[in-house]
């Protein structure tokens, strides 16, 4: 019932906060803010990219992540900068899935930045 649904939602918020913590520890990434809900925005800042290159990188990486078939994320723009928008809402999502997603984002962002978008 309602209690179970509330537990699922609380778990998704914890997952977003876990992604926030992972992002905050990595000097190549930054979180937009501490998530209050299950939605979180993070961005890759590890390369010397102008904003148009950063926008291309974020869009391409989001597409690659989706094509992996394991995760779906989107991009957004906040205050003129590109971000990944991630919203864990599946009741089956676990912490290790968030860690796998972040590892994939690290891998893809670094690979794309070496190509200089």
Image (cartoon, rainbow, N blue to C red):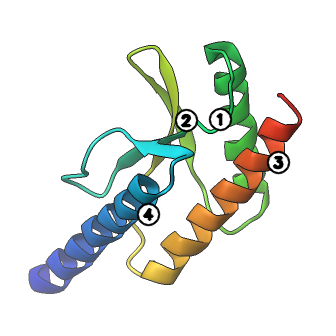
Mark closest to the chain's N terminus, 4 or 3: 4
Using a 10 Å C-alpha cutoff, classify the residue at mark 1 as few (fewer than 14 neighbours), some (14 to 19) or many (20 or more): many
Q: Please say whether residue 94 is visible from this viewpoint.
A: no
In the drawing, what numbered circle is on residue 22? Answer: 4
Question: How far apart, in angstroms, are the residues tagged by discs 1 and 2?
Answer: 7 Å
Residue placed furthest toward the right: 115
Q: Residue at x 55, y 35 (%)?
A: 75
Question: How far apart, in angstroms, are the residues tagged by discs 1 and 4?
Answer: 18 Å
The image shows residue 19 at horizontal and vertical percentages of 41, 62
Using a 10 Å C-alpha cutoff, classify the residue at mark 4 as few (fewer than 14 neighbours), some (14 to 19) or many (20 or more): some
Question: Helix, strand, or loop for circle 2?
Answer: strand
Residue placed furthest toward the left: 3
The residue labelled by disc 1 is 58
Question: Helix, strand, or loop for circle 4?
Answer: helix
The residue labelled by disc 2 is 75
The image shows residue 69 at horizontal and vertical percentages of 74, 65
The residue labelled by disc 3 is 111
Question: Helix, strand, or loop for circle 1?
Answer: helix
Q: Is residue 35 above or below residue 83?
A: below
């Amino acid at each position: 019932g309602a209690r179970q649904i509330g537990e699922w939602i609380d778990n998704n918020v914890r997952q977003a906060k876990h992604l926030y913590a992972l992002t905050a520890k990595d000097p190549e990434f930054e979180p937009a803010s501490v998530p209050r809900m299950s939605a979180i925005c993070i961005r890759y800042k590890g390369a010397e990219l102008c904003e148009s290159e950063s926008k291309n990188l974020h869009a391409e990486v989001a597409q690659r992540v989706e094509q992996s078939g394991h995760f779906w994320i989107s991009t957004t723009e906040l205050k003129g900068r590109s971000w990944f928008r991630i919203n864990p809402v599946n009741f089956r999502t676990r912490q290790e899935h968030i860690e796998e997603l972040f590892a994939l984002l690290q891998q893809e962002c670094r690979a794309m930045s070496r190509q200089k978008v």
